[in-house]
Structures are given as C-alpha cells and as structure tokens.
Amino acid sequence: MEKLRRMPVIWQAIVFAFLYEIIGELGFSIIFRTIIAPGTFIAPGMLSLIVYKFFAVLLIIGMNWLFIGQKIYFGNFHLLTWVLLVVLWLAESALLTQIHGIGHLPWAITMALIPGFVEELGMRGVVFGALLNRLKGQHAQINAFIISAVLFALLHLINLTGENFTAVLIQMISALGSGFLMAAIYERSGNLLAAMAYHFSYDYITIGIGMPGGHSNATLSIAQIVFLLVLVVVETAAAILIVRLGKPDHRDRLLVKMGKQSNSKYMKRWTTK
C-alpha cells in the first residue's frame, strides 16, 4: 500500500478505477448473481441495488483513505437552486407518469439516485478531485478532465456482463461527454452535490423512460452515432463554458477550496505549487 501512496496521481486514479471496476462492480455482481440472487444481473430490485451500492461506497471511501487521500467538497445549495431543481424533477416525474404511470416513479428514482451518488463520489469526488489538485504543468486542468472522463466511460464496460456491445458502446460514448460536464459542474461550484444533482436529473429521465427488468440489446444506426457524437460535443462545449465564463473566483470555487491560486488563462496555479 505504501507504493500506491507514492505513485503519481495519474496511476493512482487508474488503479482506483480498476479496483473499483474489478471489486466494486464485477466482484460484487458475482456475489449477488451466485450467492444472494442466483441467475440475475448484478442485483435485482431496489433493495438489492441499495445494498450492493452501499458496499461500493465503502470500497470508494476505503481506497481513498488508503492511498489517495483526496478531500471531497460539499456545500449547500442556494434556495433558488433548490427551487429550480424541484421544478425540473417535478417536470420529469410528470412526463414519466404520463408514460408509465405513477407506480413507475419509485423504481426510476432509485435507479437514478443510488448509482449517481456512488459514481459521483468516486469519479468526480475522488478521481477528478485528486487529478485537479495534484497534477502540474500548463495542461494540468485539461488532463484532469480528460483522464477522469475516459476512466468514467471505461467503467461502463462492466455492463458487458448483461448487455450487448452496442448498448455498452452507447453508454460509454454518453458517459464521456457527461464526464466532462459533471467535472466542470464540480469545479465551478466546489460542491459535489451539484454534480450529483445533474447526474440524478439526467439518469432520472433517461433511465426512467425504460422499464424495470431486463437490459438493452440495442442496435446502433448511423443516425444514432451522429446524435451521440453531437451530444458529446455539446456537453464538452458546455463544460468549457462553465469553467471559462465569469469571474475567476466564481468559476474556480473547487480550486479555491483546494487552496490553489486562480489564473486559468495560463494555469500557473499548477506550476507554482
């Protein structure tokens, strides 16, 4: 473990993501499929998902404590932010109720809330936070975004145990763009709850449109490929705007909390520490 503590932060992030994939996703899914709920994909039902992800949270906290040591930053939302979020969630709930009925909402909420909380804790709170905090050089900020987003996309390879390659490829491409955007939200706000709220809002509507049970065996058309690529470009552009627009002390709240100097034009805050 001492060797892991001395490794460059990039390799620590890779090891973190690899261990989370092998132990937190594949390992726990095998336990659920062979011991707790034989013949199922990862864990059936909402209760099993909560239990399964609870162990994943413990793994994330344990690995962060053992060899990364990255502080995770939370904060309170302003009242207006809460109002806007509630309006958005009510609108999404109304749409899902029209499609599937009100009985569908508890499943959709759980399937969006629990994975979103766990993934943001690990991939933005620990991985992106550590990379942003400890990478040095002129392109440190960009590298933190790229590495964390790519690792987040690769985490979805675990879904090959229950879905076909095309379905997983769709998820990975989508995760790449959302990885950029959620990291930008975290950096701008200095509040991991903001990234979690976006993650939940996105998954709530996209997952909620589907039905409980079963997993997609999608086919990928040219139109879908173009749409996915455009979506990644839009999310990446939105991420750039989020971390570039406005006053430095407004767009770099996470860096301020980390104690770094703000000079995003030349990114000297990484070279002077």
Image (spheres, rainbow, N blue to C red):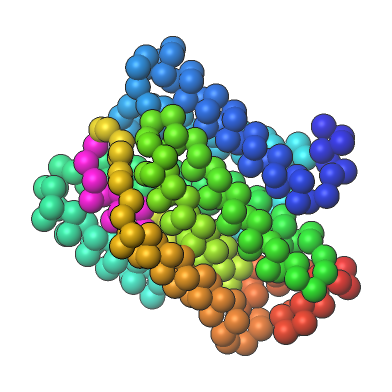
Displayed quadrant of residue 46 = top left
Residue at 55% x, 64% y: name it.
180
- 2 vs 210, left or right, is right
**Looking at the magenta stretch, what is its main secondary structure?**
helix
Quadrant including the C terminus: bottom right
Q: Position of residue 130 (x, y in %)?
A: 72, 55
Front in this rendered view, residue 94 or 143: 143
Residue at 49% x, 75% y: name it.
238
Q: Position of residue 89 (x, y in %)?
A: 28, 61
Q: Position of residue 52 (x, y in %)?
A: 46, 29
Front in this rendered view, residue 134 or 89: 134
**Residue 252 lies within the magenta run:** no
Residue segment shown in magenta: 202-212
Q: Is residue 204 visible?
A: no
- 256 vs 168, left or right, is right
**Residue 207 lies within the magenta run:** yes
Q: Is residue 177 visible?
A: yes
Residue at 44% x, 56% y: name it.
174
